[in-house]
Amino acid sequence: MSGQNQNCAKIDEVIEQFAFSGQLMTKQPYGNGHINDTFLLVYKMPDDSQKQYILQRMNHTIFRQPQELMENVVNVTEYLRKIILSQNGDPERETLNVVKTREGGSFYKDSNDNYWRVFLFIEHTVCLEMVESEKDFYDSAVAFGNFQRMLADYPASTLHETIPNFHNTPSRFRDLQKAIENDIMGRASLAKAEIDFALAREAETSALTDLLKSGELPLRVTHNDTKLNNILFDEDTKEALCIIDLDTVMPGLSHYDFGDSIRFGASTGAEDEKDLSKVEVDLSLFEAFTKGFLEGCQGSLTEKEIEMLPMGAKLMTYECGIRFLADYLEGDVYFKVHRDRHNLDRARTQFKLVADMEAKWDKLTAIVEKYKHSC
Ligand code: ADP
Ligand code: GN1
Ligand code: MG
């Protein structure tokens, strides 16, 4: 039985542990995340209405301490809930809501030692895999900027580091070097051009971490996984409604959130596009995001942080590329893959974007400069 099927087999045991009301109509795999196993549960209520939930098997080979991760998620969502209420918002739609187990816990560990959790399904929303309009991307930028601002006073020292060194690019570079050296799948010869591209940029890997060490960039509470499909848009108003996938909320640099959004959303191609002629950085989208992010942060970023935003975009794209490449070399053990060489294709798009950012560097810095004083 495949891993996914084994998980499906356990679902009935898991569902029993949560006090859902109504009659279970369907349970099916859901979404396009690369990390957790996500399912949609649809219940029929006595009045014939429907209630839906997101059930997730947390990936505990990646998140080694699921209980600590859930402590973060519960504390952060409760904190956000208070802020949303104080702004007359709707916390059941504007942040994730953890559904407790019958015993009052935030997750359930099944008889195979898998960890499961449930969130209220946020209804009437859409999740975008690609930017459909500049406005969507601008809205997502305001929302991610706002998210960072809302968590500005969150007691960072109480957050667990759910994946150590998550955006430590020099450490990711060393992981890649090890993967190349070991070459356990014998794939390095198939990725020679990509390996050369990655290794040639070693000197730049510490551009942000050096400034963090020297105190020139401040540590903040950041989301760290700000790709477009980690935000839900209201189906009717099309506004960015809720930021999801809070597993990596940890202390970090504002550049991690800015950069990860750019690498995914400002690309003219999908993250796994095979035809690299379709992949480049769209300058209008870069501009829309920069404007929105700075507005969302509402003046909370320092001059140095703003100046380094293009480097954030480049390094997060590069880092994601070397993570995909290392995973390809190691046998696709981290990111879910759906075809042969999927991770290699992903690495290629990221490196194409890095090269394009290098070619457009002056334009990227001019855009950031343009919005520097506007918010
Ligand atoms: P992963 O870590 O694997 O990316 P996510 O938490 O991002 O997992 O969830 C995967 C997908 O499931 C999201 O991209 C989104 O489409 C959907 N999703 C997750 N949580 C909710 C929710 N509370 N309401 C509606 N859709 C959700
Ligand atoms: C993963 O969980 P998901 O699919 O939103 C990954 C990110 C990568 C992204 C690349 C915990 O994000 O860091 O940037 O894939 N999340 C984790 O698409 O590693
Ligand atoms: Mg996700």
Image: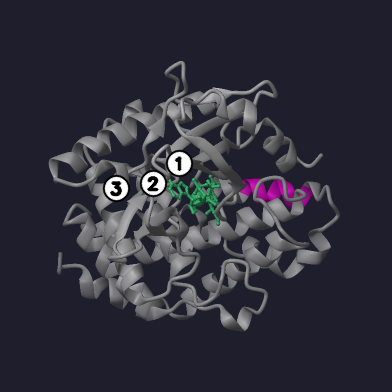
Q: Is residue 35 above or below residue 111?
A: below
The kind of secondary structure element at disc 1 is: helix
CA gap, disc 2 and disc 1:
6 Å
The C terminus lies in quadrant: bottom left
Asked whether disc 2 touches disc 1, contact meaning CB atoms under 8 Å apart, the reply is yes
Q: Nearer the viewer, mark 1 or mark 3?
A: 3
State which quadrant residue 202 falls in: bottom right
Residue 30 position in % (x across, y down)? 57, 51
**Earlier residue among tags 3 and 2:** 3
Q: Position of residue 93 (x, y in %)?
A: 31, 47
Q: Are marks 3 and 2 in contact (CB under 8 Å)?
A: no
Which image quarter holds the N terminus?
top right
Where residue 331 sits: x, y (%)?
Answer: 77, 50
Looking at the rendered structure, the kind of residue marked 3 is Glu
Indicate left or right for 263 with 292 as reference.
right
- Where does label 2 land, which residue? 223
For residue 364, say whether it is visible.
no
Question: What residue is shown with label 3?
Answer: 94
Q: Residues within 10 Å of mark 3 (few under 14, many from 20)?
A: many
Query: What residue span does the magenta drawing correspond to?
Result: 174-181
Label 1 amino acid?
Thr
Label 1 lies in ligand 2 vicinity (Cβ under 8 Å): yes
- Of the residues tagged 3 and 2, which is closer to the observer? 3
Cα distance, mark 1 to mark 3? 18 Å
What residue did someone put label 1 on? 248
